[in-house]
Image: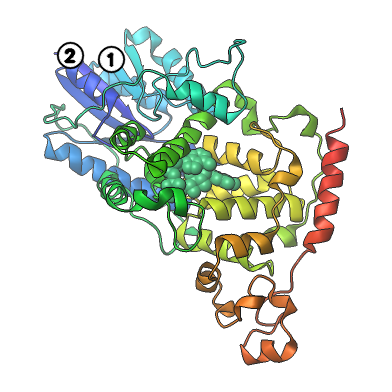
Amino acid sequence: MRTAIVWFRNDLRVHDHPALMAAIAAADRIVPLFIFNQALLTGKHASANRNRFLVECLQDLQSSLQKIGGDLLIRSGEPKEVLSKLIEETGASELHYSIDYTPYARKRDREVARAVENDGLEIVAHPGRLIADSFEGVLTGGGKVYKVFTPFWRTWAKLKRRQVLPAPAKLTVPQNMPGDSLEIVTEHISQADLSPNVLKGGETAGRERLEQFMKTGINNYAQMHDSLTPDGTSRLSPYLHFGCVSPREIEDMLRTMTGDSAARFHRQLAWRDFYNYVLLHYPDNATQEFQERFRGMEWSYDETALKAWQRGKTGYPIIDAAMRQLNAEGWMHNRARLIVGSFLTKDLLLDWRLGETHFMRMLLDGDEANNNGNWQWIASVGVDPAPVFRRLYNPMTQQKRYDEDGSYVRYYVPELSKVPDKYLAEPWTMPPDVQQEVGCVIGKDYPEPIVDHAAARIDTLERFRVAGRP
Ligand SMILES: Cc1cc2nc3c(=O)[nH]c(=O)nc-3n(C[C@H](O)[C@H](O)[C@H](O)COP(=O)(O)OP(=O)(O)OC[C@H]3O[C@@H](n4cnc5c(N)ncnc54)[C@H](O)[C@@H]3O)c2cc1C
């Protein structure tokens, strides 16, 4: 009897799962496995929001596997040790998993391969997390790694695609395998760090959201995706991060659609592949600036300013609304992420890594490749470069452009709910009698701006000019 282990990681679904389907085709018995290790529970990227979402994903996966005769085995410990023991217990002859390009995952997978190499086990890594099956040969005409998105995207769009796979109909698993309970995770989740108003995790919830978005939301995506009011994006990012929905399956759905919106949405999905490609080729980006000339850049350090930014108390309404959205929902609109990213690095002059770390702690979709890539992009130190002034946003102008009617700011910053439109982006300009009248006295009910944008802009341009000198 041939036994295969399917090691689930960030691919928590049964639909379009190449690793699961390949294992079923090759073996008589399957051991679907998830491993909790210390890094997930307490490591540098541990997050209460994401761990709660993960528990829901695993419960949903467990239930889907049970419906077809299987189950999900949960074990805790270091993957190489857990897997060695499991191979011994089950006599498994093959291990299947979905490729993960992050530096952490690649190191972990190498360690596992070394630990089990004498067990006669065949290890097969499958696509499934990204749209592209592989990045082999994805190089410029001169044979170099792409550093700019658009040319990457042109090559990526022409890559051969695999067929989308159905969910399996039946699964045979070994009986009575002792496993751990998900409580080992829940007891590590600090209630104080949880956002109150988050999406529910799991493939079932993810597919429902996808279906709904494809029915209605997608139609206006090209016009609405940048607007904060109403929110015109899919909010599929947490489901994509945990692999509850397959990006390749989404791409297939888009192929039957015409028009700007489907094309625009497809392009956004390509950014996900791009940042994974970048991290695969430049793993050091996880800790340092891609652009060497900015590695010694002088950043300020101001704990009070960082806390004000994190709590949504900077005195700039659009920044405060966005940061409060993150605190409440474990999610933030992309436009808002860009504005707060620019503000942290170019108004407060704080190191982009502080923003990256905070986002990783709070975001349901917190993802090393996407988070790091985007933080470096908005800090003007990463791939896909542009002059610093192009990504140095004026918070007032951005608010007026992307929250035209003010409803985003008024919803997340209720102290400003009665502030008249003409003062909403700069409430500190309200005359004192208006402040009294609308119950929003600046410095008492709502903070004074913690920084002067015009002065910070000059400072930033100068710092980048000095750092960028050859
Ligand atoms: C500073 C900063 C940090 C970010 N951190 C993350 C992160 O940790 N995880 C994450 O998934 N995204 C991150 N993003 C990218 C983007 O903001 C989110 O993917 C998007 O807001 C998710 O919402 P949505 O699913 O409604 O997006 P939609 O607009 O509906 O897009 C569909 C999908 O395309 C992908 N996508 C869209 N834009 C981007 C992008 N710029 N980069 C990479 N993928 C993209 C996402 O998977 C997204 O779910 C970050 C952006 C910024 C500016």
Applied colour scheme: rainbow
Query: Regarding mark 2 in the picture, which secondary structure is present there?
Result: loop
Query: Farthest residue in the front direction?
Result: 259
Q: Quadrant of the C terminus?
A: top right
Q: How many marks?
A: 2
For label 1, the SS is strand
Q: CA distance from mark 2 to mark 1?
A: 9 Å
Q: Quadrant of residue 307?
A: bottom right
Name the amino acid type tagged 2. Arg
Residue 336 location, quadrant: bottom right
Q: Nearer the viewer, residue 179 or 339?
A: 339
Seen at 32% across and 37% down, the residue is: 254
User: x, y percentage for residue 37?
Assistant: 43, 36
Residue 273 picture location, percent across and down? 47, 30
Q: Tell me if residue 23 comes above or below residue 457 in the rendering.
A: above
Relative to 469, is 210 above or below? below
Kindly identify which residue carries mark 2. 2
Asked if residue 188 shows in the view, the reply is no
Depth check: give the residue in front, 202 or 152: 152
In the image, taking residue 171 as reference, residue 442 lies left or right, namely: right
> Pointer 1: what residue?
94
Q: Which mark is residue 192?
A: none
Camera-side residue: 183 or 333?
Answer: 333
Give the x, y percent position of residue 76. Answer: 37, 36
Mark 2 residue crowding within 10 angstroms, few (<14) / some (14–19) / many (20+): few
Q: Amino acid at mark 1?
A: Glu
Q: Is mark 2 within 8 Å of ligand 1?
A: no
Q: Residue at x 46, y 33 (%)?
A: 270
Q: Are marks 2 and 1 in contact (CB under 8 Å)?
A: yes
- Is residue 210 visible in the rendered structure shown here? yes
Q: Earlier in the sequence, mark 2 or mark 1?
A: 2
Answer few, some or many: residues within 10 Å of disc 1's Cα (few below 14, many 20 plus, some between 14 and 19): many
